[in-house]
Image (spheres, rainbow, N blue to C red):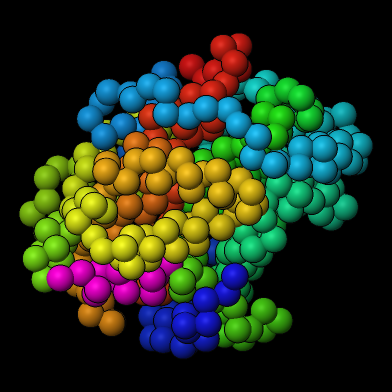
């Protein structure tokens, strides 16, 4: 349901940070496609080091995100969530009928393949697995999107499509449509689509990454990354589109509603760039968020304040944020996921980085044994703001303690290793 109190009108303020397209990487961008752009990326020492770090993390055996290095067992259980598995399977089978033998081979992996964990969110074409939508027929591309649409809630699918459109708009702004467009995304099927066996899919690219594991009438959608730069479209056929305003405004409303004593405790860093933070807490790629690409085994300690210190109305705001962050879940799935999260209110924490004035950029995290969501105002990558601003947003959702990729409930032969 749309929150009428949230202002979703484009502001155009990001245009103050439009880059000079006649210099540096922007001069070269129009002459590249995704493959040659990636080749140029790897020539950068920072990029090479980042990629090497990611590959090392990917090679680690899968354990799962934790708060202290120890997995909490028995947090997840199979239950009928009302997933319309037959509809999703039909959509997947339709896509497969449109594949050539080579495309079918590229698209499908075993259900326990390590490529589940190979997703990433930059525009750089790092993980060349599955099929890339802008390199297949429009009919097949549409059919793959049909799988996603059949899996997600209508509002969740619309949010994902808006992020893809924002990427396309960025390609127009930077004259780089061969690298940044609404179909510059990869898709993998894991296992055989089935209404009575485990399988799933991954969809990833610039600012859109989604991992969905399905088992009969149960699903886990995690990890999920949704972002945008800029987070609005103020011209063209999609003019009026804005991204992640509810998560932004609800988070700010929650922080501003806290009494001063709780604000001070929740605000773990006042400086949005976290000057003086411990090593590893900030990096140039992920900046303030902790649970992004290749961070499947990261230890993320609880910090800030417990939800038990909040009023009922503030806890209600927390669940409004969670619903926005998990909006891609169909209603019946969300209700079961909400019940699961509510069981752990005693161990649910809220933390904040940056100011909390109306114009301040910020980061916040809600974290429990069964869910982590992060919201981050990012520095510019294509825009030229050097400090975090409200025009580049990253949001992440995870299921800790081996909930990601549904691993905690996978049959032994399907578990990630």
Residue at x-position 64% and y-position 40%:
81
- Judged left or right of residue 407, residue 31 is right
Q: Is residue 2 magenta?
A: no
The quadrant of the image that shows the N terminus is: bottom right
Q: Position of residue 168 (x, y in %)?
A: 63, 68
Task: Using the rendered image of the protein, determine whether residue 303 is visible from the camera's viewpoint.
Answer: yes
- Judged left or right of residue 386, residue 172 is right
Q: Position of residue 49 (x, y in %)?
A: 33, 38
Which residue is nearer to you in this view: 302 or 179?
302
Task: Using the rendered image of the protein, determine whether residue 377 is visible from the camera's viewpoint.
Answer: no
**Relative to residue 167, is residue 399 depicted above or below?**
above
**Relative to residue 84, is residue 184 depicted above or below?**
below
Q: Is residue 248 magenta?
A: yes
Per the picture, the main secondary structure of the magenta-coloured stretch is helix
**Relative to residue 296, is residue 367 depicted above or below?**
below
- Judged left or right of residue 269, residue 291 is right
Most extreme residue toward the top is 413
Which residue is nearer to you in this view: 77 or 93?
77
Residue at x-position 86% and y-position 36%:
93
- Judged left or right of residue 200, residue 356 is left
Most extreme residue toward the front is 312
Q: Position of residue 317 (x, y in %)?
A: 37, 65
Residue span colored magenta: 247-259
State how many labels appear.
Answer: 0
Most extreme residue toward the right is 97
Which residue is nearer to you in this view: 374 or 173?
374
Residue at x-position 34% and y-position 41%:
344
Q: Position of residue 338 (x, y in %)?
A: 48, 48
Which residue is nearer to you in this view: 90 or 309?
309
């Amino acid at each position: 349901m749309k929150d009428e109190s949230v202002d979703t009108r484009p502001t155009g303020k990001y245009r103050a940070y439009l880059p000079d397209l006649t210099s540096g990487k922007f001069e070269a961008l129009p002459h590249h496609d995704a493959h040659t752009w990636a080749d140029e990326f790897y020539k950068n020492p920072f990029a090479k080091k980042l990629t090497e770090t990611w590959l090392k993390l990917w090679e680690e055996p899968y354990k799962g995100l934790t708060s202290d290095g120890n997995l909490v067992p028995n947090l997840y259980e199979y239950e009928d969530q009302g997933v319309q598995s037959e509809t999703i399977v039909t959509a997947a089978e339709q896509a497969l009928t449109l594949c050539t033998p080579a495309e079918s081979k590229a698209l499908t992996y075993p259900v326990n393949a390590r490529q589940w964990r190979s997703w990433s969110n930059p525009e750089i074409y790092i993980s060349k697995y599955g099929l890339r939508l802008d390199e297949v027929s429009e009919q097949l591309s549409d059919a793959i999107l049909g799988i996603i649409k059949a899996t997600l809630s209508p509002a969740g699918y619309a949010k994902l499509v808006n992020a893809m459109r924002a990427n396309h708009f960025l390609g127009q702004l930077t004259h780089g449509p061969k690298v940044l467009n609404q179909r510059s995304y990869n898709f993998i099927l894991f296992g055989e689509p089935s209404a009575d066996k485990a399988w799933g899919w991954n969809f990833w690219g610039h600012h859109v990454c989604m991992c969905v594991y399905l088992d009969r009438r149960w699903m886990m959608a995690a990890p999920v990354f949704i972002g945008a730069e800029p987070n609005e479209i103020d011209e063209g056929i999609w003019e009026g589109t804005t991204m992640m305003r509810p998560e932004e405004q609800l988070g700010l409303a929650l922080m501003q509603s806290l009494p001063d004593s709780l604000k001070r405790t929740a605000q773990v860093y006042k400086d949005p760039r976290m000057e003086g933070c411990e090593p590893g807490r900030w990096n140039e790629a992920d900046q303030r968020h902790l649970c992004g690409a290749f961070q499947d085994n990261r230890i993320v300690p609880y910090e800030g304040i417990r939800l038990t210190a909040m009023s009922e109305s503030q806890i209600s705001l927390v669940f409004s944020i969670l619903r926005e962050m998990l909006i891609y879940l169909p209603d019946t799935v969300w209700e079961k996921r909400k019940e699961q999260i509510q069981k752990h209110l005693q161990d649910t924490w809220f933390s904040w980085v940056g100011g909390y004035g109306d114009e301040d950029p910020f980061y916040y995290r809600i974290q429990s044994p069964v869910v982590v969501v992060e919201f981050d105002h990012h520095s510019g990558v294509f825009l030229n703001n050097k400090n975090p601003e409200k025009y580049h947003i990253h949001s992440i959702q995870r299921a800790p303690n081996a909930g990601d990729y549904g691993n905690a409930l996978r049959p032994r032969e399907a578990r990630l290793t």
